[in-house]
Image (cartoon, rainbow, N blue to C red):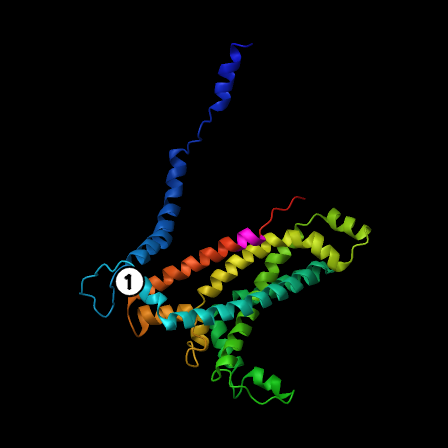
Amino acid sequence: MSNRTPSLKRRKGRRKKAKLPISAKVMLLPSVITLFVIGIFPLLFAAWVSTRQYELSKPYEEKVFLGVQNYLTVLTDPEFWTALKITFTFFIIALPIQLFLGTLIASFVYGLKLPWFAAITRVVLVLPIAVTPTITGLLGRLLFNSDFGLINYGLSFFGRPPIQWLAEQKAALVAIIILDTWQWTPFVALVLLASLMVIPPHILEAGRLDGGTGWKIFRHMQLPYLLPGFTALLILRTADILKMYDTIYAFSKGGPGVATELITLYINRIGFGKVFNVGLGATQAILLLIICIVLSRTYIRLFYRDVEA
């Protein structure tokens, strides 16, 4: 028995790596190539361009290596910080509103006793998400039109004078917050509703038998199951807001002035609009990617928790 023990330990210590068959590698190859073409290569190209003097208006000039000069130029550009400030103002206001309203809607749908009504509600929640961002911006121009828009028409019943939504800076920012909240709050609600649906019924029943009220049940039993959904929503919605372009461009083109010029519109203006400096535009895009990654890691560290049933 003692002679067999060392060999047995050696056999247990050996871990054979599972090898994919050739057919599986061949089937994965198109996905790997697609990922490289649409994901990895553009990122590497943007990183390369960010270190060069690259201007579309001067296509025949040599792409001179500048090192970190583009990054220093961007970081000392007040217009870049202004666009970033507007973006984070929009982000800090819109995201909490969407999470709060989404939580209320998800809790309401989860508590419905009529299955058919809950099913209809889920279908209705999908409709705003199905509208493309450009159409949302164009609809916003109609709704917030100062002369014949439905928003001003509704405000007139409360004795409010017409608001120049597309001419006043604060009003324009409020308008795009309303548009984004209308379109993406249902998405937040559906994700949180899915999180609520996985809660074991016996946990909620035990809480009710112990005399738990609505708030205590939510705080101690439902919220732990919602945290993974909250984390995913924070990551997804942060990325969406930081790269938001279509809706804003269709609604206000960044105006009035630069009141709604988010960082993506500013990057487009520098890289492909009036300046045509792709090097600076790529630099700003890389910095925006870094900000998004830092925020995502922060969300996971602060909010994500594993839940044991």
Residue drawn at point x = 43 percent, y = 69 percent: 84
- Residue 7 is left or right of residue 198, and the answer is left
Residue 281: x and y, percent?
33, 65
In the displayed structure, would residue 121 be above or below residue 303?
below
At label 1, the amino acid type is Gln
- Residue 64 is left or right of residue 47, and the answer is left
| Magenta residues (range) | 299-303
Q: Is there any visible trace of residue 141 in the rendered image? A: yes
Residue 195: x and y, percent?
63, 53
**Element at label 1:** helix
- Tell me the quarter of the picture where residue 309 sits: top right
Q: Is-magenta flag for residue 223?
A: no
Residue 200: x and y, percent?
70, 47
- Residue 143 is left or right of residue 282, and the answer is right
In the displayed structure, would residue 34 be above or below residue 149?
above
Q: Is-magenta flag for residue 302?
A: yes
Disc 1 crowd rating (10 Å Cα; few below 14, some 14-19, many 20+) is some
Residue drawn at point x = 55 percent, y = 58 percent: 233
In the displayed structure, would residue 103 be above or below residue 33?
below
Residue nearer the viewer, 25 or 94: 94
Q: Which residue was labeled with disc 1?
A: 69
Q: Is there any visible trace of residue 183 in the rendered image? A: no
